[in-house]
Every structure is written in structure tokens, then in C-alpha cells.
Amino acid sequence: MAHSLLQSTTKLHVLKLAQLLYYESMKYLGIDYGTKRVGIAISDEAGTLAFPKVIIPNTPLLMEQVASMYRNEDCEGIVMGESLDTDGNENKLMADIRHFADVLCHELQTKVFFEKEFMTSFEAHGRQGKESLHARQTGIKKNIELDASAAALILQRFLDKHKVS
């Protein structure tokens, strides 16, 4: 019994080490896909913190722009928001998101991960409001881009879930 417990413990440590090596040492591009605009976020080199980057109009040039940013930033993975309705079912936009993810995966030869995006735009709007209020009080002008902030929240959720302690 002690032998099988040791084997189970060793397997768990090997899995945690593999997870650590795979997830934590990667730089990710986060995407909040919308029909009009696409928010982009980027993680730090260690894959622990996400930062809003830019908003790109959803035009026929979108794929080229995202691919270029992915390559220029030396990313190793992509995290996209998984768009679900309030019942947890895929909404109409999710088919477009999956198609875009498939094309990215093929074009960039990379993994695309999905993270639930439920309420991220609302949360980003709330954070923007707090920062705007702070900016008015301190005299600092800040322009927080809502879709890029939502992309950062999606990416940060993913990074937090895949941290290995």
C-alpha cells in the first residue's frame, strides 16, 4: 500500500512539474472577440500577469493583425474568451469565435485555450469607472480601453487557474 501511495504521489508531482513547465513559462496573447472590435491583452514573460494591449477593428485584416502581434510579442499560446449565455450554453457569437480560433491555430501552429468571458466587459467597465474617477481626482488623464481590459481579465483568469503552487 505504501508503494502505491508513493507512486501516486510521484505521478502527482510529475504532473504538477509538467504543468509548471508548460503553463507558467509561456507568454500568452489574450483575445476578447467581438463582431465590431477585438480586445487584445498580453501576459508577462512568466505567464503570471495580463495587461490590456490594444483594440483592433474586426475587419478582413484582423487575422493578419493578430498573427503579426502574436509573432512580434514572441507568444507561445492564445487564450480566447468563451462566449456563453446565462444558462452556460454557447451563444451565437461562439461559432465565429471557434472559427477564428481554428484559423489562428492552423495559421500560427499554436494552441488556443478558451476561458469563460462571462461578465468581463461589465467588470472592465466597473474598473474603468473607478480608474476614471481616480484620474479626475488626481488630475491624471487615462484612457482605458474597455475591450482590451476585458481581454486582460479573460487572460488573467486563465493564468490564475493554471498557476502551480
Image: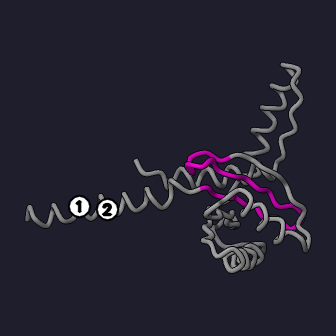
Residue designated by label 1: 10
Q: Name the spot of residue 44 as percent of width and height, x first.
A: 62, 47
Tag 2: residue type? Val
- Front-most of 82 and 53? 53
Identify the residue at the far top of this view: 138
- The percent coordinates of residue 8 (x first, y second) are 22, 64
Q: Which mark is residue 14?
A: 2
**Res. 78 image quadrant:** bottom right
Q: Quadrant of residue 82?
A: bottom right
Q: Is residue 165 left or right of residue 77?
A: left
Closer to us: 68 or 7: 68
* Magenta highlight on residue 34: yes
Q: Residue at x 40, y 47 (%)?
A: 165
Where residue 67 sits: x, y (%)? Answer: 76, 68
Is 129 located above or below residue 154 in the figure? above
Within the magenta stretch, is there residue 94? no
In the image, the segment drawn in magenta is: 27-50
Q: Residues within 10 Å of mark 2 (few under 14, many from 20)?
A: few
Q: Residue at position x 69%, y 52% from top?
A: 42
Q: Dividing the picture into quarters, in which one does residue 1 lie?
A: bottom left
Front-most of 6 and 94? Answer: 6
Please give left or right for residue 132 compared with residue 111 in the image.
Answer: right
Residue at horizontal 89 percent and vertical 71 percent from the top: 61
Q: Are marks 1 and 2 in contact (CB under 8 Å)?
A: yes
Residue type at tag 1: Thr
Alpha carbon of mark 1 to alpha carbon of mark 2: how far? 6 Å
